[in-house]
Image (cartoon, rainbow, N blue to C red):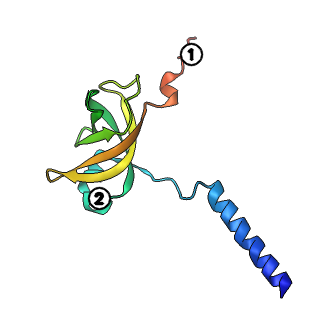
């Protein structure tokens, strides 16, 4: 009986360690602005990731408008924008999809600007 409890305890411990090592949940896939707006009812109140290009931004309000060239989405950043943020840049935003004035917007978002490959110096031959 004691041996069974020990084995059960080890199995539970290993499962907890595995879950914590993975960060607790699987990563969310990036959505396009159009996909998010088309299926907004499925995502309201949920944490989502969306990728798009910056159309405009208002640093005084920590608000950026992104697009996938079909739809636009307002993104309210929870922190000051990165210094590299500018119109035309590709960003990835992660936040909670909310509704205001009948339309969706991304609240409490954190953003990443561009990708690391954009910052690599081109190799000249």
Relative to residue 69, is residue 100 depicted above or below?
below
- Whether the residues at callouts 1 and 2 have beta carbons within 8 Å, the answer is no
Q: Secondary structure at mark 1?
A: loop
| Between 49 and 24, the one nearer to me in the picture | 24
Q: CA distance from mark 1 to mark 2?
A: 44 Å
Q: Residue at the spot x=85%, y=82% of the render?
A: 3
Looking at the rendered image, the quarter that the C terminus falls into is top right
Residue 27 shown left or right of residue 12 in the figure: left
Q: Secondary structure at mark 2?
A: loop
Q: Residue at the spot x=30%, y=33% of the render?
A: 62
Answer with the quarter of the image where residue 72 lies: top left
Residue 91 position, x and y percent, is 38, 35
Q: Residue at the spot x=26%, y=32% of the render?
A: 61
Spot the residue most to the left: 101
Looking at the image, tell me whether mark 1 or mark 2 is earlier in sequence order: 2
Residue 123 shown left or right of residue 90 in the figure: right
Looking at the image, how many numbered discs can be counted on the residues?
A: 2
Relative to residue 17, is residue 58 depicted above or below?
above
Residue 82 shown left or right of residue 10 in the figure: left
**Residue for badge 1:** 123
Looking at the rendered image, the quarter that the N terminus falls into is bottom right
Q: Which mark is residue 44?
A: 2
Residue 36 position, x and y percent, is 30, 52
């Amino acid at each position: 009986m004691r041996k069974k409890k020990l084995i059960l305890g080890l199995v539970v411990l290993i499962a907890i360690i595995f879950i914590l090592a993975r960060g607790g949940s699987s990563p969310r896939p990036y959505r396009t602005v159009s996909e998010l707006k088309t299926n907004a009812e499925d995502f309201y109140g949920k944490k989502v990731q969306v990728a798009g290009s910056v159309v405009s931004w208002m640093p005084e309000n920590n608000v950026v408008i992104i697009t996938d060239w079909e739809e636009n989405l307002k993104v309210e950043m929870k922190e000051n924008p990165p210094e590299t943020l500018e119109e035309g840049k590709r960003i990835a935003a992660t936040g909670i999809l909310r509704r205001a004035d009948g339309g969706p917007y991304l609240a409490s978002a954190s953003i990443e600007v561009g990708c690391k490959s954009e910052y690599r110096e081109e190799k000249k031959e």
